[in-house]
Image (cartoon, helix red, strand yellow):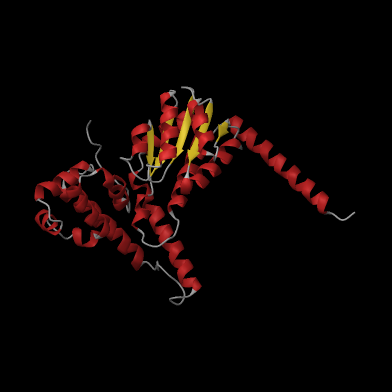
Amino acid sequence: MTQQRAEPPVGGTRAHLQSLLPSLVPSERRVIQLCVSDPEDVAQMSVSELAQRTETSPATVVRACKRLGFDGFQHLRQYLLRDLGAAEWGTTNGREDHSGEPGSAEYVVSGIFNRAATEIRSALGALDYAEFQAAANAIRSCRRLFIVGNGASLPPAQSIALRFLTSGQVCEAPADIISQQVAAKLLTPADVCLAVSDSGMNTFTLQSARLAAEGGATVIGITSYAKSALAEVSKHTLVAGAEFHAWNDETVIGNIVQMLLLSALHVVATSNSPEAAAAHAEVFRQVLTMVEDGDARDTPQ
């Protein structure tokens, strides 16, 4: 199969590289890992310098770049230089990573939010929009939507399931692993399995995805890695968020990318749907009734 030519958006080159990193052999991985961790230095190197730095050969450098969709190292280098220039422009236009005094709560909070905002802008570097549209179309026309996620991916999976339910979509997202696999086994070719796994390697999520595929259901994978086991099972793979794994602190930002991507998928899948609009209106009326009933019970007699 012909490798798709890489065209990451501005700021998205590192995310693209990171999403495909696990698919490379160790020598190629060393080359691309340096591009991810030290793009400033790599952008100033020649092929031979990069090969020497990573203890590989010039042929390995070129092969690694081509494996990720670039014409060669100079093509990748152009994208690194472009992104570095864009980042420098942002810095010189008054964007600071932190506010407040170092060590203060304001300094920590502002740093986390500003870094998240910067990285979220680049998180779509590996997303294939044609695949995204195909996934949304599959959900729009399916009989039943089954959503599965485990571990840190469970909260985003549960949250988006509620969003689809309020849009009138027949949807289920059991939290129990046995229930997940039973439900997946009962899916048919008229159904969709939306599997959420940041690593694309969660054993329980993979088993449900495989059971769904065996029954003929359309499997949509949400993951950070384009060459993961989940991607192999999925008919449509939506990749975003690998860049966050370069962070060495303990902020849980990857879930934000998952949630944003799932929310966008919900919007596209339910847009211009009279049924979804009617369901939203009915849900809104029901929520108002629940609130009014609660207020009535709390009113002193």
Q: Is residue 186 above or below residue 267?
A: above
Residue at 23%, 43% in the rendered image: 68
180 and 88: which is toward the camera: 180
Identity of the residue drawn at 47% across and 32% down: 193
281 or 296, nearer to the observer? 296
Q: Is residue 271 visible?
A: no
Q: Position of residue 6 (x, y in %)?
A: 26, 43
Residue 296 image position (x, y, % from top left)? 82, 49
**So how many labels did they put on this image?**
0
> Taking 72 as reference, is 285 left or right?
right
Outermost bottom residue: 101
> Quarter holding the C terminus?
bottom right
Q: Residue 132: name its quadrant.
A: top left
| Residue 84 visible in image | yes
Q: Is residue 296 left or right of residue 173?
A: right
Is 277 drawn above or below residue 101 in the view shown?
above
User: Residue 128's image quarter?
Assistant: top left
Residue at x 41% of width, y 25% of height = 214
Q: Position of residue 120 (x, y in %)?
A: 41, 53
The spot of residue 11 in percent (x, y) is: 32, 54
Q: Quadrant of the N terminus?
A: top left
Q: Nearer the viewer, residue 233 or 183?
A: 183
Q: Is residue 56 left or right of residue 84?
A: left
